[in-house]
Amino acid sequence: MLKRLILLLVSGVLLVTGWLAWFAASRLPLPQTPFAFELTPGSSLRGVARQLTAAGLLREPWSFIALVRLTGRATDLKAGNYLLEQPPTGLELYRMLTRGEVQVAEIRFIEGWTFRQVREALDAHPALRHETKGLSEQEILRRLGIDAPHPEGLFFPDTYYFGAGVSDLSILRRAHALLEHHLAREWEGRQAGLPYRSPYEALIMASIVEKETGVAEERPLIAGVFVNRLRLNMRLQTDPTVIYGLGEAFDGNLRRRHLETDGPYNTYLRPGLPPTPIAMPGLAAIRAALHPAPTRALYFVSRGDGTHAFSETLTEHNRAVARYQLR
C-alpha cells in the first residue's frame, strides 16, 4: 500500500511538472495580433491570472498561477498596460510581467468621431509610424484587408496602447477587429423582429443613435423611435445624417436649404437608412440599436439641456417644438 501511494505521488509530481514544462514552453494563442491588455494596480497573483483569462490570453488561470508560484515571485508581477506583437510562451509572459515591460504610448478614439477625425489623430501622434498618411480611404481598406466600400464606422472607439514605432495600420487593424467582435456578439443576442437585414445596417443605426444622443440613458429610447419609423416606412428625418452628407461644407449651421437638397445622406428626403454609418458608435449605442426601448413614440425634439421630449403624435411633437425650440 505504501509503495502504491509513493508511486501515485511520484506520478502526480511528474505529471504536474510535465504540464508546467509544456505550459512554460508553449505559445499562447492571442485573441488578436497585436494584443493589448491591462493589469490593474494592487492585483494579487490570482487576480492577475483571472484578468489574463478574462482577456482571452489564458485558457485557464491555474497553470500560470502554478508557474509563478514555482519561481517564488508571486508578488513581483507589475501592473500596467502591455502589448504583445506576437504570441508569447507561458515563460515569456511571466518574464514580461515580472520585468514590468509596460507600454507608454496610447491613442484614444472617441465615440462619435468620423473616420476623418480618426486619421487626424493618427497623423498627429508622434509615437506612431505613419503608413496611412496620404493614402486614399480605399487604399487603407485594401491594406487592412477589409472588404467594404467605405471606412466610416468600421473602427471601435477605445483607448489603444502600443510601443513606439508601431504602424498606424496596426492600430486601425486592432480597432476594426474589436468592432467586428462587439458587433458580432451583440448581433447574435439582438432583439427579435428588428428591421435590419444585416449587422452592417444595425451599425448604421447605432452611428445615428450615437450622434443624436446627449444623455446616455436616452439611447435605447431614441433607437426605439427610429425603429418605429423604419417599420412604418417613415423617413428618419435626422439632422446628423444631413450634416455628415455636407462634409467639410458644413459651417455649423444647418439651414432649410440643406434639408431640401437631395443626397444619399438626406434622411428628410430619402426613406430608410443612409448608405453607410456616419460616425464610430460606442458599445452602448450598438446595444441600443439592437435592443431598442419599447415605445410608441415617433418624434423627439431637444429640450436644449441634452435631453429630449418624446411624442407619439405630430400634434404633441409640434407642441414640444413650440415649447423648447421656438420660445
Image (cartoon, grey):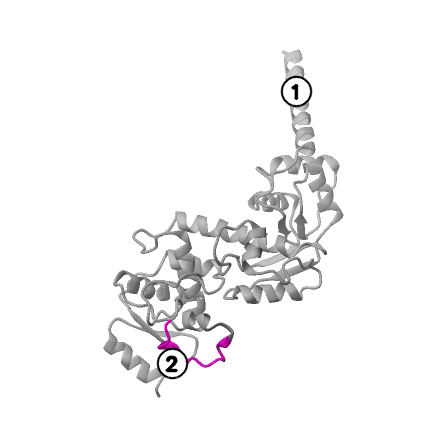
Q: Is residue 213 visible?
A: no
Residue at x-position 37% and y-position 76%: 261
Give the left or right position of residue 306, taking residue 167 as reference: left
Residue 31 within the segment the image draws in magenta: no
Q: Residue 9, which numbered label?
A: 1
Can residue 326 be seen here?
yes
Q: Quadrant of residue 221?
A: bottom left
Look at mark 2 in the image and give the residue it sits on: 257
Rendered location of residue 314, percent (x, y): 25, 75
Q: Earlier in the sequence, mark 1 or mark 2?
A: 1
Expressed as whole percent of the image width and height from the top left, the position of residue 90 reads 68, 37
* Rendered location of residue 134, percent (x, y): 63, 63
- Magenta span: predominant SS is loop
Rendered view: 185 above or below 205:
above
Q: Could you say which quadrant of the image residue 223 lies in? A: bottom left
What amino acid does circle 2 point to? Answer: Arg
Residue 323 percent coordinates (x, y): 32, 84
- Is residue 91 placed above or below 295 in the rendered structure? above
Where disc 2 sits, the SS reads helix
Tell me the quadrant of the picture where the C terminus can be found: bottom left
Question: Which portion, as a residue range, is magenta?
Answer: 249-262
Disc on res. 240: none
The reply to whether the magenta stretch includes residue 257 is yes
